[in-house]
Amino acid sequence: MGFIKETQQGANPKDKDLTDVKTLINVKANVETVYTKNDETILLLDQLDESLKFLQSHGISKDKEMKQTSKLFSEWTGLKKLAKDVKKEIAPLCDAESKRNMAVITRHEEDLKQYIAAMKKRDFYRYDTGRDTALHSLENVNGEIEERIAKTSELRYNAEKFEHPTAIEASEVKIKEIQNEVALMQGLWDHIAEC
């Protein structure tokens, strides 16, 4: 089972920089995989073992296959022990990163609120700006929004991985507000061109 070896390599924190968020998330994900796939893996191993015992009782199976199955059982047991140990080891790091991520999300939400307030003072809200200048400003705002969407998306990923996915929802609502406001202003300036 390549799954056992791959998961063991991914879950093993040895020679990994756990202060790097992506590395920590990867190790955490591999540890969680051990827990989520435990029943399925044990079932597969049991089925394999029973099949080999049945074949052996009819003289079809060899001792080599039984030893390989036994080795798979011991590798899975070793992986479960590793996962348990690593889970304890990374728990404080995950807690610290979770708190740090929550603080970043809170700051991001505040930045979005300030951005909305500052956006109301932009030149495309004034008629005397003129259509061309207003459309150019709206185009710039769309670029700024894309950057904020990318940041929000990154924060959502981290929030989900550190088990507080709802924390980013307020920021996503703010992004939608900004997009709606820009779309309304775009529509207004397009309407002005038709008049």
Image (tube, rainbow, N blue to C red):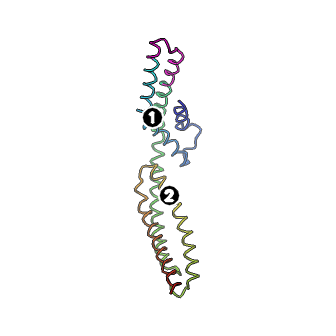
Question: 10 Å neighbourhood of mark 2: few (<14), some, or many (≥20)?
Answer: some
Q: What residue do we see at 49% from left, 20% from top?
A: 70
Q: Is residue 135 left or right of residue 94?
A: right
The residue singled out by tag 2 in the image is 153
Tell me the tag on residue 22. none
Is 71 a magenta residue?
A: yes
Question: 10 Å neighbourhood of mark 1: few (<14), some, or many (≥20)?
Answer: some
Relative to 87, say whether 58 is above or below.
above
Q: Nearer the viewer, residue 7 or 68?
A: 68
Q: Are marks 1 and 2 in contact (CB under 8 Å)?
A: no
Relative to 188, say whether 53 is above or below.
above
Q: Is residue 112 left or right of residue 15?
A: left
The residue tagged with tag 1: helix, strand or loop?
Answer: helix
In which quadrant of the rendered view does residue 46 lie?
Answer: top left
Which is closer to the viewer, label 1 or label 2? Answer: 2
Q: CA distance from mark 1 to mark 2?
A: 30 Å
Which residue type does callout 2 highlight? Ser
Residue 98 is situated, as x and y percent measured from the top left of the image, at 45, 51
Residue 20 is situated, as x and y percent measured from the top left of the image, at 56, 48
Residue 154 is situated, as x and y percent measured from the top left of the image, at 51, 56
The residue singled out by tag 1 in the image is 84
Q: Is residue 20 left or right of residue 91?
A: right
The residue tagged with tag 2: helix, strand or loop?
Answer: helix
Residues shaded magenta: 53-72
